[in-house]
Image (cartoon, rainbow, N blue to C red):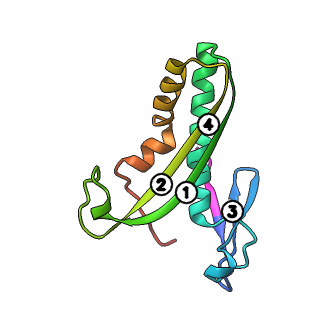
Amino acid sequence: MREVIVHGDASGFSQQILAGAHALTADEPVEGGGADIGPSPYELLLAALGACTSMTVGMYARRKAWPLESVTVRLRHSRIHATDCADCETKEGMLDRIERDVQFIGALTTEQRDKLLEISNKCPVHRTLSSEIDIQTRLI
């Protein structure tokens, strides 16, 4: 796994990201105090989930030789009151909600579409976000 390096000069929210040979910029929108010169951290998180979802579904369809032509994933992040989520373990305070809409283009049967939707919940990033995460931070 390649290391990701994020650097900011502390004068604002803009951050330079190096992921292997790829350079990206992250920032906050103007209304959040940033300059909006790149996606926000939550937009990057949604992009990771969307990309992983599309890649996983595409890989599965290729292995099955199914006629999937393209995948579009639309994602939104919000904070909701835990009491508004009947299926959630957390019952007090606020929790994060990610809404993900997946569109499959191709001459797929209903059964194939249902299976691809099931597979979308098995992408590695979805599994990571749905499981317990242990983040260890140290000062260097």
Q: Amino acid at mark 4?
A: Gln
The residue pinned by badge 1 equals 76
N-terminal label among 1 and 3: 3
Give how far apart the Cα atoms at labels 2 and 3 are. 24 Å
Q: Are circles 1 and 2 on residues that touch, CB within 8 Å?
A: yes
Please tell me which residue lies in front, 55 or 67.
67
The residue pinned by badge 2 equals 98
Residue 137 at what x, y percent from top left? 44, 66
Q: Main secondary structure of the magenta part?
A: loop
Q: Are circles 1 and 3 on residues that touch, CB within 8 Å?
A: no
The residue pinned by badge 3 equals 17
Q: Amino acid at mark 2?
A: Ile
Disc 1, SS: strand
Disc 2, SS: strand
Disc 3, SS: strand
* Dot in front, 1 or 3: 1
Residue at the image position 45 percent from the left and 30 percent from the top: 118
The residue pinned by badge 4 equals 103
Q: Amino acid at mark 1?
A: Arg
N-terminal label among 1 and 4: 1
Please tell me which residue lies in front, 71 or 11.
71
**In the picture shown, does residue 88 fall above or below 116?**
below
**In the picture shown, does residue 47 fall above or below 34?**
above
